């Protein structure tokens, strides 16, 4: 007799222990703790014909965006496909999604998960995967709407409701609906203080609204709830951004050294992404980071020619150019140029539209050719969401453009770009600092001084 999970979603298995193990592993995946892959492996050893177990394992791996997991992901897909005649329609939908993902069609995978949700709006795994994949693909509206479509089917009494609030909170935040994002995110954290994704969504609200002190308090006051989990690295990065905006560079470097830097070569890519993104911001601010680029470049080196995910490639590129690894930087460019000419998968559009121009811009920035940086980034600045990630992560592109305009002496352009930033986030000292530099460059001394005073008024002393 086939069973359902705790939310009434059907499974083809008749083994209650398999369902319970899947739910326990999924709970770990949802709150970024423990080792959900090991948990599902254990139950699959006992029940190798557990279709949804294989789907779960493969699904977890889709989110890694690393070539080193591809063999395992495809093996889990094959195991699920071999059992397809025993699977129900929902499970066949998951198999189709993973098959599309393994074939490089990430958009098609999302469509399959969304089709599952039309029939089973309480399929929390399909919801989580569609939402997280939208984040990876930079589909900003669907990050929100995929949750909105099923939201009325959920309520507080249904297990996992808090996680749905957390997903919705992040989707709303990326769509700049900050008030509702904060309300849902805080509601989720009130339900489960260890919900790292919801903590993260509220941190994004703080970041986007320039509430640096509130963000520092939000993160540090609940550090015990997130600092031991699998999302800790990214959350430390968020905390460091608040300090960076306030000009507290010593604290930023302290967080980098104590929490972000990980010399373990088996560490996952997300750690390297956050590290590179933070050091690049410090470079834009002319902060000396010593030998930190070298350690990071050593970690990125093996994946220089991956071309699996443009978002990874641009972070590899900025690391190589900052450490003077010219050969590796050329390897990134050559691999991406070859790939963009011949490939036809979902990532190729990201690479062509944003990945390659930004990689070339990073190289030009490191060489001091700031005019070229401006010429490369200005045309693509409103298409950067194709790169995936969040507004906060992609802000390095807009910031790089403005810094290059300042260094190239294109002060009128720099002023217009700085105006944009001070309008969008008027409580950011860094935004006023850049505006003051542009005004000074234009010879508007008294206005530059008033703008610098504005920056000072927002900086804690
Ligand atoms: Fe984030």
Image (cartoon, rainbow, N blue to C red):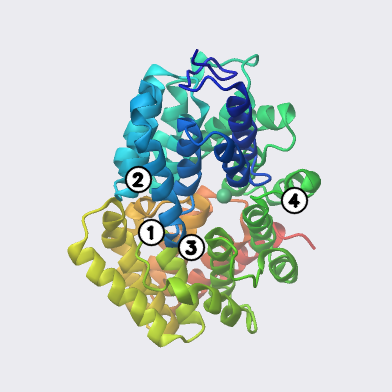
* Residue pointed to by mark 1: 309
Pick whichever of labels 3 and 4 is earlier in the sequence: 4
Q: Is residue 247 above or below residue 441?
A: above
* Residue pointed to by mark 4: 228
**What is the quadrant of the C terminus in the image?**
bottom right
* Residue pointed to by mark 3: 396
Q: Secondary structure at mark 2?
A: helix
The image shows residue 100 at horizontal and vertical percentages of 31, 42
Pick whichever of labels 4 and 1 is earlier in the sequence: 4
* Residue pointed to by mark 2: 101
Would residue 181 be seen by someone viewing this image from the given angle?
yes
Cα distance between the residues tagged 2 and 3: 28 Å
Q: Which is nearer the eye, 402 or 257? A: 257
The image shows residue 36 at horizontal and vertical percentages of 61, 43
* Label pair 1/2, CB-CB below 8 angstroms: no
Q: Is residue 184 above or below residue 277?
A: above
The image shows residue 210 at horizontal and vertical percentages of 62, 49
Cα distance between the residues tagged 4 and 1: 27 Å
Q: Nearer the viewer, mark 4 or mark 2?
A: 2
């Amino acid at each position: 007799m086939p069973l359902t999970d705790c939310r009434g979603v059907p499974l083809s298995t008749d083994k209650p222990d398999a369902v319970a193990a899947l739910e326990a592993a999924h709970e770990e995946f949802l709150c970024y703790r423990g080792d959900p892959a090991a948990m599902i492996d254990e139950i699959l050893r006992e029940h190798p014909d557990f279709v949804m177990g294989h789907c779960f394992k493969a699904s977890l791996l889709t989110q890694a965006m690393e070539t080193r997991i591809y063999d395992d992901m495809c093996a889990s897909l094959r195991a699920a496909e071999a059992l397809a005649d025993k699977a129900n329609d929902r499970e066949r939908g998951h198999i189709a999604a993973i098959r599309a993902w393994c074939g490089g069609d990430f958009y098609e995978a999302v469509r399959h998960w969304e089709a599952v949700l039309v029939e089973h709006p309480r399929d929390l795994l399909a919801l989580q995967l569609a939402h997280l994949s939208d984040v990876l693909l930079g589909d900003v509206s669907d990050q929100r709407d995929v949750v909105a479509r099923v939201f009325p089917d959920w309520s507080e009494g249904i297990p996992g409701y808090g996680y749905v609030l957390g997903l919705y909170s992040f989707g709303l935040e990326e769509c700049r609906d900050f008030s509702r994002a904060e309300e849902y995110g805080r509601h989720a954290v009130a339900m489960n203080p260890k919900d790292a994704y919801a903590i993260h969504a509220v941190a994004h609200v703080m970041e986007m609204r320039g509430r640096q002190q509130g963000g520092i308090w939000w993160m540090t006051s609940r550090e015990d709830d997130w600092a031991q989990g699998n999302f800790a690295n990214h959350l430390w990065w968020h905390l460091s951004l608040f300090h960076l905006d306030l000009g507290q560079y010593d604290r930023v470097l302290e967080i980098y050294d104590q929490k972000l830097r990980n010399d373990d070569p088996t560490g996952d890519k997300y750690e390297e992404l956050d590290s590179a993104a933070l050091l690049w911001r410090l470079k834009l601010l002319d902060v000396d980071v010593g030998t930190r680029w070298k350690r990071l470049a050593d970690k990125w080196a093996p994946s220089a020619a991956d071309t699996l995910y443009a978002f990874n490639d641009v972070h590899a590129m900025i690391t190589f150019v900052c450490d003077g690894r010219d050969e590796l930087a050329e390897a990134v460019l050559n691999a991406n140029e070859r790939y963009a000419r011949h490939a036809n998968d979902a990532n190729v559009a990201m690479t062509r539209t944003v990945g390659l121009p930004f990689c070339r811009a990073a190289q030009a920035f490191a060489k001091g050719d700031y005019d070229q940086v401006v010429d490369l980034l200005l045309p693509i600045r409103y298409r950067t969401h194709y790169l995936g990630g969040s507004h906060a992560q992609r802000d390095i592109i807009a910031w790089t453009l403005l810094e290059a305009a300042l260094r190239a002496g294109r002060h009128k352009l720099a002023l217009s770009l700085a105006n944009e930033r001070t309008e969008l986030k008027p409580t950011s000292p860094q935004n006023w600092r850049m505006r003051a530099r542009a005004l000074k460059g234009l010879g508007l001394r008294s206005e530059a001084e008033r703008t610098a005073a504005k920056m000072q008024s927002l900086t804690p002393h």
